[in-house]
Image: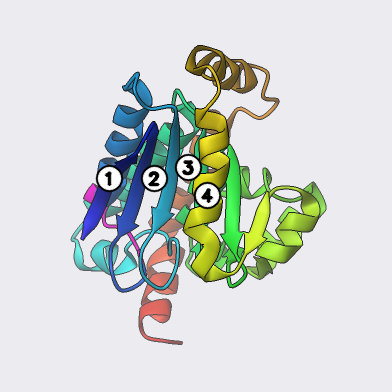
Amino acid sequence: MGILTGRDGHIEVVTVDFPPVNALPVQGWFDLADAITRAGRDPAVHVVILRAEGRGFNAGVDIKEIQRTAGYDALVGANRGCYAAFGAVYDCQVPVVAAVHGFCLGGGIGLAGNADVIVAAEDATFGVPEVDRGALGAATHLARLVPQHLMRTLYFTARKITAAELHAHGSVYRVVPRAELDEAALEIARDIAAKDPRVIRAAKEALNGIDTQQVHRSYRFEQGFTFELNLLGASDEAREEFLNGR
């Protein structure tokens, strides 16, 4: 359980395994960031695959950890951890392929949205339920997956979108049966890994350099409103309602 790593030739496979729903605790986000950053710095690694075990790819932060921790330490830690993990995917020196199954929510959107390639299982759904949790964030990354007005609709309503719908928008590269997801991710990763790593690493840096969206700054701006909502009491009330099943 935790953040697991393995190697398939020149491909580093990073697996998230935090049962039951892969809602990561504070330390889990930092561990994920460290694993991806280390992989990208390793000259023997040409591509990183980010995948998960269990029922879904990622359910965001561990709300129970935030609620049972006095003060704001867990909240600050979760925000900093998410910022670190999302940034590690974006800044990884080699391409990151996200293999998504089941639910990809909140923090999962931050990871997938910052990935270079997304392959998804037929059962994958994507969404940002933050407004129902009294928080804001990951609109930056959702905007990398869908057009602007659809992003706003999904954000305000907390509705989810399917892998097939994202495939139609071009943000998901392939949609496959769940049993074929790992092989589909390996297939595209092997194709990339076979290229000259000097060129691929330069290409990753170049593509980030011409990106029109400054993901680090825009996500940090979003996080500021989460702190404001916490000070107003709205976030705590929403989290309690969620945990109590209301």
Q: Can residue 183 be seen from the camera position used here?
A: yes
The residue labelled by disc 3 is 224
Magenta stretch contains residue 25: yes
- The amino acid marked with disc number 3 is Gly
Q: Which element carries disc 4, helix, strand or loop?
A: helix
Q: Nearer the viewer, mark 4 or mark 1?
A: 4
Q: Residue at x 36, y 35 (%)?
A: 9
Q: Position of residue 37 (x, y in %)?
A: 34, 30
Q: Position of residue 89 (x, y in %)?
A: 45, 36
Magenta range is: 22-27
Residue at mark 4 to residue at mark 3: CA–CA distance: 35 Å
Q: Nearer the viewer, mark 4 or mark 2?
A: 4
Foreground of the two, 139 or 92 = 92
Quadrant the N terminus occupies: bottom left
Q: Residue at x 73, y 56 (%)?
A: 167
Which label's residue is closer to the chain start, 3 or 2?
2
Magenta stretch contains residue 12: no
- The amino acid marked with disc number 4 is Ala
The residue labelled by disc 4 is 185
> Which label is found at residue 5?
1
The residue labelled by disc 2 is 82
